[in-house]
Image (cartoon, rainbow, N blue to C red):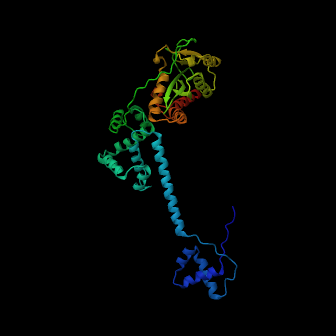
């Protein structure tokens, strides 16, 4: 670490300081204005009193920084930092799950930033009116519940923003994980009052072409008892509607842990789509898969020569549902329903890239790592698999 450079002062500067002292300015004022110490000013005054021709050195006084300007710049930087932080949190909150409650989310963001930004500036940044915000705030505070209910309601609202399609049972479990205690009946009532209960819509689009001459395999999954991972994988295809086209998603799911092992998104519904998802699943596991059953529908993509050969090369047995019976592949259908309700229906994808980025985030970050699954004790698939590995080690 280098040495601090020593300040040097010219004779003219020292005399100017002494003249200011003679003009009724106090030592403290002079020191504050010129960033000097009392000891230094007193020494100059003493030396000049002994010899009026003192200060013959060749020092140069450094230009003094305008303290008022510095304080103003620091204030502006602090304001910009607060505004930037507010926008990051607010926009992330809104873009995460855009929906019909977007205006309420804007008001909630303004409410959360109290103390860091003026209300007038916050509503301007969020694009809402100040009067509308105060009307919402007045309506929100009209009914004042007791303190425990207020905290519980706020936590439920946070969970609903993170997982918009959670029902009251999953919300109740998530509340326990976050340190709150509440019965399911109470959670249901609070969600009903805040209009947070899910409303589901039906969808139907055919993605299975079973009219082909290729071999159809026996249903090995029916009645199968599963006691661990890599015993039964299920695969399926669904469509996703963009603004001007359809794209198709193929997935491979481990039934025991409910983990999505591999997926592929494409504009074409062909064998390359399903093979891409299968290769990703094989890359995820990277282990011996002898005895594993792969179950799918009778679609041409799964019955194709390339797909079946890839399964057999890895020692995987092929299983297919009965024709026209979606219940035989209920686990894959359940995943597709979750994907549609909790991600696809909440967004309007304009381009293929938009769909790819959002679906990748949902599967890899939300579904596999965060979303609670009732069938595995309200844990995420990856968390559940970690507990299995711990039990094996133990």
Q: Residue at x 55, y 85 (%)?
A: 22
Question: Residue 373's x, y, as percent?
Answer: 47, 29
Question: Residue 327's x, y, as percent?
Answer: 45, 18
Task: Classify 231 as above or below 73.
Answer: above
Task: Classify 383 as above or below 54.
Answer: above
Quarter of the image where one finds residue 280? top right
Task: Classify 142 as above or below 321.
Answer: below
Q: Is residue 278 left or right of residue 258?
A: right
Question: Residue 394's x, y, as percent?
Answer: 57, 28
Front position in the image: 381 or 317: 317
Front position in the image: 221 or 388: 221
Quarter of the image where one finds residue 315? top right
Q: Residue at x 62, y 72 (%)?
A: 63
One can see residue 255 in this view? no
Q: Which quarter of the figure is the N terminus placed in? A: bottom right
Task: Classify 34 as above or below 205.
Answer: below
Q: In the current view of this chain or complex, which residue is farthest to the front? A: 244
Question: Residue 83's x, y, as percent?
Answer: 48, 54
Q: In the current view of this chain or complex, which residue is farthest to the left? A: 142
Quarter of the image where one finds residue 217? top right
């Amino acid at each position: 670490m280098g040495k601090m450079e020593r300040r040097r002062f010219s004779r003219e500067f020292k005399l100017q300081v002494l003249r200011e002292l003679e003009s009724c300015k106090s030592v403290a004022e002079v020191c504050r204005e010129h960033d000097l110490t009392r000891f230094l000013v007193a020494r100059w005054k003493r030396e000049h009193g002994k010899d009026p021709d003192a200060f013959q050195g060749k020092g140069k006084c450094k230009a003094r920084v305008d303290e008022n300007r510095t304080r103003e710049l620091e204030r502006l930087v602090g304001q910009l930092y607060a505004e930037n932080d507010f926008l990051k949190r607010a926009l992330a909150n809104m873009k995460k799950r855009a929906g019909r409650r977007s205006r309420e989310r804007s008001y909630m963001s303004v409410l959360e930033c109290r103390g860091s930004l003026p209300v007038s500036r916050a509503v301007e940044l969020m694009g809402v009116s100040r009067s509308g915000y105060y009307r919402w705030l007045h309506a929100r505070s009209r009914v004042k519940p007791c303190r425990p209910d207020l905290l519980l309601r706020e936590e439920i609202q946070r969970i609903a923003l993170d997982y918009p399609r959670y029902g009251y049972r999953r919300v109740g479990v998530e509340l326990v994980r976050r340190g709150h205690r509440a019965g399911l009946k109470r959670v249901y009532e609070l969600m009903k009052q805040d209009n947070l209960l899910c409303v589901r819509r039906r969808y139907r689009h055919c993605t299975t072409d079973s009219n082909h001459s290729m071999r159809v395999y026996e249903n090995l999954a029916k009645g199968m008892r599963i006691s661990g991972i890599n015993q039964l994988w299920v695969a399926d295809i669904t469509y996703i509607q963009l603004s001007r086209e359809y794209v198709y998603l193929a997935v491979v799911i481990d039934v025991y842990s409910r983990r999505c092992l591999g997926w592929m998104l494409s504009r074409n519904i062909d064998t390359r789509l399903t093979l891409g998802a299968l290769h990703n699943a094989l890359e995820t596991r990277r282990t011996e898969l002898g005895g594993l059953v792969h179950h799918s529908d009778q679609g041409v993509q799964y019955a194709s020569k390339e797909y079946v050969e890839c399964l057999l090369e890895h020692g995987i047995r092929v299983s297919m549902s009965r024709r026209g019976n979606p219940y035989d592949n209920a686990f894959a259908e359940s995943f597709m329903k979750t994907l549609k309700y909790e991600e696809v229906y909440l967004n309007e994808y304009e381009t293929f890239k938009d769909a790819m980025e959002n679906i990748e985030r949902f599967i890899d970050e939300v579904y596999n790592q965060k979303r609670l699954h009732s069938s595995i004790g309200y844990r995420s698939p990856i968390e559940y698999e970690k507990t299995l590995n711990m039990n094996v080690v133990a």
